[in-house]
Amino acid sequence: MTILGIEQITYGVTDLETCRRFFADWGLKEVAHDETRARFETLNGCTVLAVDANDLSLPVAFEAGPTLREVTWGVATREELDALRERLKGQPGYTSTDTAVGCYDPAGMAIRIEVTRKREIDVQGSPSNVWGQTLRVDQPSPIYERAEPVEVGHVVFFTNCLAEQEKFYHELLGFETSDRYPNRGAFMRCAPHGGHHDLFLLALPDGKKGLNHVAFTVRDIHEVFGGGLHISRCGWTTQLGPGRHPVSSAYFWYFKNPAGGLIEYYADEDILTPEWQPRDFEPGPTVFAEWAIDGGLDGNTRRQKNVQAPEGKFMTERKQ
């Protein structure tokens, strides 16, 4: 039994119209909406639901305010789904229908598992020319005017029960731990062979639990920049980025999300196999980011925010 990845995320929101505008700017396709909810898709059909926080059909929130209410994980077959019915029996909030099974994890986040509905797509990022390996010839790298996220790549939660959550996802859902902040955090991937992490659990000193961020995979570093510049032009606020994570090697750009927590564009993460041995890291600013721009880039000047834009056609043209 192997979890394939995130199938759907469901937010409970307090301002649906603002969230609809934000997710449209983010590059998601709105496929349905009414007075209480809106449904969006990524390129491969991964779903984002924004639902009025007062809707009684939502799972119980694990923190106040707008936040993530449920994560749906996908499996390949009905047989794998049925096997999980037995594994999850007895867990808090256990539910089982013909098409899904669910419960709450140890920190109170609702999870659901269903057979994947995501579609195969033909999407390619731009190859990089590195010393000793030329992959792009007679072809410039792209410049993106905005992002079109491929899928929801990972979620990050603050937890007050790190050991219990790590055990839950490993023993019941088959996740593997990729790297750790000892006694503080666990980066976990759905399967032995896959991207660096689909889930990151972080214990804060004050014991707070809640949503940190949801991350959307884009094609390449150029789309991280193109998407981030577009979101900046639309007036949304950067939390941090662009930058690069040393732990997963991924390039990132984080924004504040009106649906709750932060939201991230990322690309170029490490791919791991069963041969990988988890590493231990001491948390710190330089471990989180090898480099990062605080406050982001201005989408119009393409420079760091609050920095004067160039005026001439060439960098050498300056006012006297």
Image: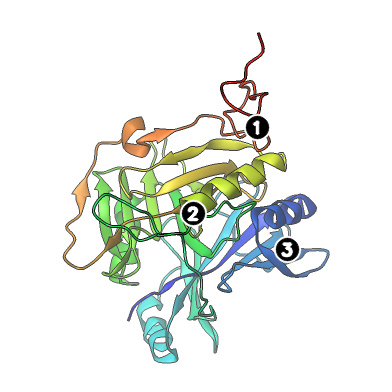
Q: Eyeballing the image, is 181 above or below 114?
A: above
Q: Within 10 angstroms of label 3, few (less than 14), some, or many (20 or more) residues? A: few
Q: Nearer the viewer, mark 3 or mark 1?
A: 1
Three-letter code, disc 2: Ser
Question: Which circle, 1 or 2, is nearer the viewer?
Answer: 2
Q: Is residue 77 above or below residue 204?
A: below
Q: Position of residue 228 (x, y in %)?
A: 59, 45
Single out the residue that lies furthest toward the top.
320
Residue that badge 3 annotates: 55
| Color encoding of the figure | rainbow
Q: Nearer the viewer, residue 312 or 159?
A: 312
Other-residue count near label 1 (Cα within 10 Å), few / some / many at <14 / 14–19 / ≥20: some
Q: Between marks 3 and 2, how big is the CA–CA gap?
A: 45 Å
**Residue at image coords 37%, 86%:** 83
3 or 2: tag closer to the N-terminus: 3
**Residue 213 appears in view:** no
User: According to the image, label 2 marks what residue?
Assistant: 141
Residue 115 in picture, x, y percent from top left:
49, 83
Q: Residue at x 70, y 62 (%)?
A: 51
Tell me the number on the disc at residue 82. Answer: none
Q: Is residue 199 above or below residue 42?
A: above
